[in-house]
Image (cartoon, coloured by chain):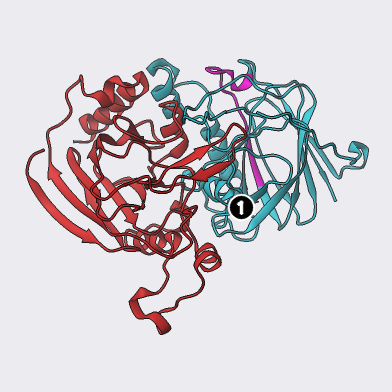
Chain colours: A red, B cyan
């Protein structure tokens, strides 16, 4: 890993959005264990292009994310490649919590009674950050839940695996496109912990090298090699 | 998959207020009023009917695959499943189903994803996203690509294994199989009757589906 250019500790139920350039790497570190990072991704300049859960899954024949898989857009291109991953399983089908779910699970805690410990939810955090970039409800699509594991039985019934991510676990995302990253650290919507307890996460951004053609993100699936080429073609033509 | 018990409907097609055939590869847009029942019939079997729903009075409130999965803690859609919107509202409920396994993970095909999934020369093939875009443009609320979210694939079989693999299996649907949905609020249904020829979702032969509505 090369030069560290940015670092931030994001509190539990915190939210953050920035544009991260192509070939920079974002590292997310679960500081306490049990973190969840809800994330949506948009092409920095063409924001109608966005993260696509179905193409990410069917392009790689998987139900979850892990290294060396990629995060696909809805235009046959890649936002990012997962270059390091000490966790091995990240959910992308369960979406985010909303006010109704948080109140039903954890009860009400308002700003008036709890000041900045009031209960936040993933959906509102997404909408608040999206609005700062001219985006809104039309742009809400299924998100990624980094660090959270959900498994399916043979009948499609889902269960949350508690204790999955440990203190110090991290993932690295090397960006393949200039990307608007919108994230929050609210709990996973199916978190089995009955206590409202969102965890803090460390964010770091590094300058990194472009991938070589034998990079595992290319070789893991032929679909990814074509998506890498589509992404390179975008920049070949646009720049 | 455990043994599926089909849920039959008692509704009589002769009494439907609307009866229409959506040809293979075509799009279809129609309002379903609160309390009305929409039936989608897989006429020849193994067809994928890619479908989105919107609140008819506020299209910002629309079908959400992840909220539907989250609310039910379940991946597959069948009788009893409530289709949940991005604002957490119930749009429709599945009230009958003779197929037993409808997907909402696989999304729609697009010309761009066909390139990614299959080959660069597949780019010119007709695909669901183009049909969805034409459908919302015809409905005309200033909607477009941005409003095309992750859809339901009625009659499509995308099993997930406990170790997290995703498969596109042969369909479990057959000729005449149907699914029926009761609208909980006024909704607009937007369908792309999938033209995909590159995988078994349509048994490599896209065919028509029939849509009926009862008061």
In the picture, measured across the screen, residue B197 lies left or right of residue A171, that is right
What segment is highlighted magenta in the picture? B189-202
The image shows residue B158 at horizontal and vertical percentages of 57, 28
Q: Is residue B61 above or below residue B115?
A: below
Q: Is residue B126 above or below residue A111?
A: above
* Residue B124 or residue A13, whichever sits in front: A13
Q: Chain of mark 1?
A: B
Residue B191 in magenta stretch: yes
Q: Count the marks: how many?
A: 1
The image shows residue A224 at horizontal and vertical percentages of 33, 25
Q: Residue furthest bottom?
A: A112
Residue B22 in magenta stretch: no
Whether residue B149 is visible to the viewer of this picture, yes or no, is no
The image shows residue B144 at horizontal and vertical percentages of 50, 46
Q: Residue furthest front?
A: A163
Name the residue carrying label 1. B84
In the picture, measured across the screen, residue A125 lies left or right of residue B100, that is left
* Residue B91 or residue A238, whichever sits in front: B91
Q: In which quadrant will I find the N terminus of chain B?
A: top right
Whether residue B181 is visible to the viewer of this picture, yes or no, is yes
Residue at image x 38%, y 43%?
Answer: A50
The image shows residue B48 at horizontal and vertical percentages of 64, 28
In the picture, measured across the screen, residue B25 lies left or right of residue B34, that is left
């Amino acid at each position: 890993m090369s030069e560290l250019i940015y670092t931030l500790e994001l509190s539990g139920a915190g939210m953050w959005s920035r544009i991260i350039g192509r070939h920079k790497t974002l590292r997310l570190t679960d500081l306490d264990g049990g973190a969840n990072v809800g994330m949506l991704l948009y092409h920095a300049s063409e924001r109608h292009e966005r993260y696509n859960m179905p193409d990410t899954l069917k392009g790689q024949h998987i139900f979850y994310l892990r290294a060396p898989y990629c995060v696909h857009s809805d235009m046959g291109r890649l936002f990012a490649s997962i270059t390091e991953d000490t966790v091995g399983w990240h959910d992308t089908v369960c979406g985010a919590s909303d006010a109704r779910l948080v109140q039903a699970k954890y009860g009400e805690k308002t700003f008036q009674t709890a000041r900045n410990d009031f209960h936040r939810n993933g959906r509102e955090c997404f909408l608040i950050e999206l609005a700062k970039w001219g985006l809104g409800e039309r742009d809400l699509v299924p998100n990624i839940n980094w660090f959270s594991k959900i498994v399916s039985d043979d009948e499609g019934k889902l269960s949350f695996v508690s204790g999955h991510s440990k203190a110090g676990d991290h993932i690295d995302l090397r960006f393949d496109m200039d990307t608007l990253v919108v994230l929050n650290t609210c709990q996973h919507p199916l978190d089995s912990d009955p206590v409202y307890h969102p965890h803090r996460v460390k964010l770091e951004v590094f300058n990194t090298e472009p991938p070589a053609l034998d990079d595992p993100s290319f070789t893991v699936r032929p679909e990814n090699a074509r998506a890498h080429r589509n992404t390179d073609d975008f920049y070949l033509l646009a720049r | 998959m455990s043994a599926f018990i089909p849920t039959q409907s008692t509704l009589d097609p002769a009494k439907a207020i609307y009866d229409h055939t959506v040809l293979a590869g075509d799009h279809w847009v129609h309002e379903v009023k609160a309390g009305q029942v929409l039936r989608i019939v897989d006429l020849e079997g193994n067809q994928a009917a890619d479908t989105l729903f919107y609140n008819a009075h506020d299209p910002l409130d629309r079908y959400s695959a992840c909220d539907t999965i989250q609310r039910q803690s379940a991946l597959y859609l069948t009788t009893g499943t409530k289709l949940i919107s991005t604002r957490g509202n119930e749009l429709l409920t599945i009230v009958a189903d003779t197929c037993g396994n409808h997907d909402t993970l696989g999304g729609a095909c697009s010309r761009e994803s066909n390139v990614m999934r299959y080959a660069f020369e597949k780019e010119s093939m007709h695909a669901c996203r183009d049909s969805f875009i034409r459908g919302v443009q015809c409905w005309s609320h200033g909607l477009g690509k941005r409003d095309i979210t992750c859809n339901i694939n009625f009659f499509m079989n995308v099993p997930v294994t406990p170790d997290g693999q995703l498969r596109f299996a042969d369909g479990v649907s057959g000729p005449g199989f149907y699914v029926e949905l009761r609208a909980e609020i006024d909704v607009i249904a937007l369908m792309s009757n999938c033209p995909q020829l590159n995988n078994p979702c349509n048994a490599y032969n896209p065919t028509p589906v029939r849509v009926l509505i009862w008061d």
